[in-house]
Image (cartoon, helix red, strand yellow):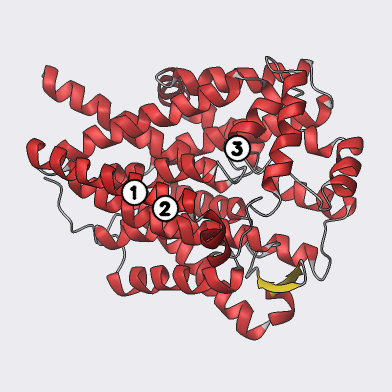
Amino acid sequence: MYSLDHSPRAEPLSWPRLIREVVAIAWLCLASQAVYVLLVLGDDVILSPRQEALLRLFVLPSVPLAASLLVLRFREMATTLLRLPFLALFILLIWASVTWSLDAGLSLRRALSVTAYTLIAVWLALAFEPAALLRRLAWLALVILLLSVAFAVLLPGLAFHEVDGRLLLRGVFSHKNGLGQHLGLAAILLATAWQFRLIPRFWAGLGLFSCLVLAIPTGSATALLILFALALTGLAARIVLLPAKLAIAVACFGLALGIFLVLALILGAEQVFAVVGRDLTLTGRVPLWSFVWWQIVEAPWLGHGFAVYFDIPWVESYTTETLRWPIPNAHNGYLELWLGIGIAGPILVTLFLVTALWQGLAMLRVDYSPQAMFAVYFLPIYLLRNIVESDLAAPSQLSWVLAVIAVVFAQKASKEQSRSRNG
């Protein structure tokens, strides 16, 4: 059984370790997109082409960094990627889509971004002990939360922006959806940190409380649902640890309760959506998904090119005029990938994540560890979140980095378990 005491241990300071720490922390800060995107945007609502070009300079260092890390730890990273065939096939597919993309240059740039972020995520999972990496991620998530509170108090003109006539909190992000996404990620990291004492429980508890409080002025129903799903996932993880017969009995009760709740939601959908500030179209998502589906039907096998469709001029004009709001993506990660690289895209990514989730659940029964708990917390919530959001293998997204880290953690643990059984 894994020890719950994961307080920091003193390690001898050396130049390689210092460089590793600086590189990891600096890059994670950039990948979070906190503060600097907001400062570039300023009082504007939408990024101008000049501002977008400036922000690309912040993403650019990821490419040489990923290449350098791959060269320095080629054998270990290549071996890890070969053991993740669904991920390797997915990366090959997004690069292949450049050849048939509606905008080959844009697909190429975004394929390069996803590849670089994936390689850096693999390096992070290999270069740090799981508890040490999760500790750093939890502290980063907490600092961003506290900065969002500070901006709300001291710089409300920047921290709040108007969306559909309502003044909503965006904290240190360029849009309230950015803060909403961070609340979900932070809650998972801080729940893991609190459970295994990766950071002092006072700070972890303060961070979790901040996630709940900030979700209200952010107007993020998704963040609130993620917090609820996090609690349910933690409960489900506890059930997994019970003796087999008792676990089956509790799971059956939970299934019956879940069916009842789903029926209640279907019968009282209008009232439920009204409570969370949404309508039956899920804030315009239903007509958007209808539009996206018809575009998928035009190229169901290969798609229109990785992550470019909503940047095509006529699509931007159509969605703004017809659907009445500027749309950056499909607001569904599975449809987004299908639209871009064909039906194989969402299948490969789902298999990549679900396989790791199964490994994480198996690992949790054998080794109650922070990496197992993080995988079990993060992966199902990430999969469910992408039913209404689009950050599934999205370019320049920290959530994809965390997903790859969770998968590598699960894969490494599964490999170690196999060795111990065979040994």
Write the residue at 72% across / 65% down.
38
Q: Quadrant of residue 128 in the image?
A: top left
Q: Amino acid at mark 1?
A: Phe
**Which mark, by number, is residue 260?**
1
Helix, strand or loop for disc 2: helix
Mark 2 and 1 residues: CB-CB less than 8 Å, in contact?
Answer: yes
In the rendered picture of this protein, how many numbered marks are placed on residues? 3
- Seen as rendered, the residue at the extreme bottom is 154
Q: Which residue is mark 2?
A: 264
Q: Give the image location of residue 167, x and y in percent.
A: 71, 75
| 289 and 27: which is toward the camera | 289
Q: Amino acid at mark 3?
A: Gly
**Which mark, by number, is residue 33?**
none
Residue 296 in view here: yes
Q: Is residue 175 above or below residue 291?
A: below
| 24 and 44: which is toward the camera | 44
Q: Give the image location of residue 100, x and y in percent.
A: 79, 16
Q: Is residue 133 above or below residue 291?
A: below
Write the residue at 63% across / 18% down.
93
Helix, strand or loop for disc 1: helix
Q: Earlier in the sequence, mark 3 or mark 2?
A: 2
State the separation of the CA atoms marked 3 and 2.
Answer: 27 Å
Q: Give the image location of residue 281, x and y in percent.
A: 66, 50
**Which mark, by number, is residue 333?**
3
- Seen as rendered, the residue at the extreme front is 267
Write the residue at 26% across / 28% down.
414
Q: Is residue 92 above or below residue 171?
A: above
